[in-house]
Amino acid sequence: MHIDLLIINASQIATPIDRGRPCVKNELSDISIIENGAIAIHNGKILDVGRTNVLMKKYSADVIINAENKLVIPGFVDPHTHLLFAGYRDDEFVLRLKGISYMEIHKRGGGILRTVRMVRKASETKLADETIKRITRMILNGTTTFEIKSGYGLDTKNELKMLRAIKKIKEFLPVDVIPTFLGAHAIPENMSAEEYVKIIIEEMIPKVAKEKLAVFNDVFIEGGFTYDQCRSILLAGKEHGLIPKVHADEFRDANGAKLAAETNAISADHLVNSSEEGLRMLASKKVCGVLLPATSMSVGSKFANARKMINLGIPIALGTDLSPACLCESMQMVITLAIHFMKMLPEEALTAATLNAAYAIGLRDRGSLEKSKRADIIILDIPRINFLGYLFGGNLVTHVIVNGKILVEDGKIVSHLKSR
């Protein structure tokens, strides 16, 4: 049979196993490894996976990639980003190094509120163009699916502007971009929480839903909201078809894990300070726990207790949390941090950054290298999965394939991604 693309001679093909739900406990490390492997790709899908000598007899191809001495894995899925923003906060990074906390900077009018002021001044086109540059660099590093949140508008006009900019990005790029409405990111200046929550529920959510600008509805309790206010926002979103997500317990136990479980959220993200009760509730509801170790490193906080969560049976995913406060564009870096500081095994980190990350944003057609799955695949210049976290500090990706099309070849972006 003649097909579109054939990857051959891979030192290892390593993939999580899709059981029709996120992986938990020992399933995280129970991955399939094929030595001297090959993958047949046709019409954007994975047609076959096996040993090279077997697939070479079955298929001829328009394009053949020789992955000798290389590791082939699913494309990274980033389930938590704030990719769309204006300006930078590198001076605040230095303040944190001097001992001033993230929340103290926020109270002084910096942090989220500072970015809000810059986003409000930026045009929709400017926001989209700057974000495309970041996404392009992330594609080079192996990310093939992106969740992007609003949350730096904090009024109806600018939250909609952000979500429309995300829509523009989706139309331009050949990768999938999943939009999340995060109106409840912080309380706007010169407004009470009660006033703002009313605007989110009565004005923002209906307009977001009417224009179909978001899939998810996220809240950040520690941005100044009460538990009940966040619950009301999430339930209002559900009434309009928006799926709940929760920024949970990043700096303190604000009962974010409990809120995610109570509202049947698709994910609870951060979970650095969640209570035992909250974590057990997440496990019982099988809510994905999205862990963000680059944020812990960037803001100087402790790391989430991944081992405890895995043992409890919470489905664990990994994300960058890319934002002006955590300027991490590499899921490879996130995997390294998860392995070294959260004591995750390379196999667990791979599953968390691919299959479970896809489930954390409601996608079931990717995240593993199995027949009929979408052909989102990356090739790394390492021979075995054990090199994840072992060799670090550079970009290991040589090829990125999205929906069966080669976007990165020999470490370079193909021409149609170079300019708008």
Image: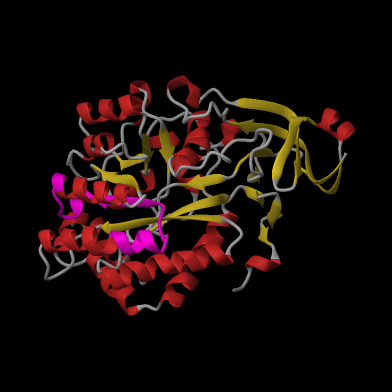
Q: Residue at x 15, y 69 (%)?
A: 189
- Look at the image and tell me in which quarter the C terminus lies: bottom right
Q: Position of residue 223 (x, y in %)?
A: 19, 55
Q: Residue at x 40, y 57 (%)?
A: 214
Q: Residue, x 51% and y 46% (percent of image)? A: 77
- Which residue occupies the foreground of this view, 395 or 144? 144
Residue closer to the observer: 318 or 22: 22
Q: Nearer the viewer, residue 273 or 315?
A: 315
Q: In this orientation, does residue 88 appear?
A: no
Residue 350 in percent (x, y) is at 52, 35
Q: Is residue 334 left or right of residue 379?
A: left
Q: Quadrant of residue 209?
A: bottom left
Q: Which residues are magenta?
A: 205-228
Question: In this rendering, would 102 be left or right of 3?
Answer: left
Q: Looking at the figure, which quarter contains the N terminus?
A: top right
Residue 362, x across and y down, in percent:
46, 42
Figure quadrant of residue 327: bottom left
> Is residue 204 in the magenta section?
no
Residue 178 visible somewhere in the drawing: yes
Left or right: residue 376 versus residue 60 is: left
